Image: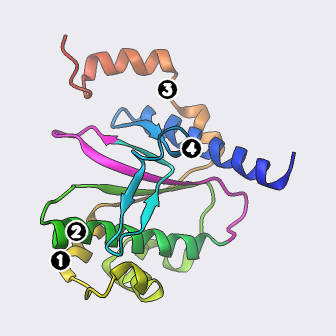
Amino acid sequence: MSGRERMHKKGAEGVDLARLILESTTWIELPFDAADNETVCTLERLDGEDKAYDAMGFILREPKVPLYVESKNYDVTGNQGADFSEFLANAYSITARDLIRKKVDGRREFMWFTTHPFSLNRWSDLVSPGEIKRALANHPEVLDGEGINLDVLSIVSDRLWLINVHHKQSELTLSAEELNRIEALLNRKRRKK
């Protein structure tokens, strides 16, 4: 198996792990992934560039909240800090496009799901407005000439998720049968009874 095939397989395994763990919480539904549904998983930034996320679904609040997930299935840190900075800049740019240019709030939330910790000396601040501002300084192209809006910084910070799991955590998730029984009781997906 070539390095590229191994990388693709590892990425798909990461999306599967994210789906397994997140859906097991009964609060998240991830029916779409970029491999099969790239259009649904793709959003537009301020500069008109598209960003495809690994998975898309919903947080099952009332009403449902769109969730875009970037999954990193790493054994080592690698370039995760730099990749996360780009993730923050993209989340800001997509949200700013909604709020500033389109004047509509897409209410999207963005999740970084990883199997390896990174940037440990800044971990508690990684989703802060200051960290997003730093990411925008590293990726000014996503602003398309717009200034940084402090209200949008705060909104994006509130809508970011940073999840770090170990592969063995999958052993603690609900089985599909257990999940179906619990969902029937909770009815978070708002199916008619």
The image shows residue 112 at horizontal and vertical percentages of 47, 58
Residue that label 4 marks: 15
The quadrant holding residue 116 is: bottom right
Residue 110's place in the image compared with 153, above or below, is above
Q: Which residues are magenta?
A: 58-78
Disc nearest the viewer among 3 and 2: 2
Residue that label 3 marks: 174
Q: Secondary structure at mark 1?
A: helix
Checking the image for residue 155, the label placed there is: 2
The image shows residue 161 at horizontal and vertical percentages of 39, 58
Q: CB atoms at circles 4 and 3 under 8 Å apart?
A: no
The quadrant holding residue 25 is: top left
Q: Quadrant of the C terminus?
A: top left
Residue that label 1 marks: 151
Disc nearest the viewer among 3 and 1: 1
Q: Secondary structure at mark 3?
A: loop
Q: CB atoms at circles 1 and 4 under 8 Å apart?
A: no
Check disc 2: other Cα within 10 Å, few if <14, some if 14-19, many if 20+. some
Residue 120 vs residue 82, the one in the foreground: 82
The stretch drawn in magenta includes residue 69:
yes
- Residue at 21%, 24% (x, y): give it: 190
- Residue at 41%, 68% (x, y): give it: 49
* First in residue order: circle 3 vs circle 1: 1
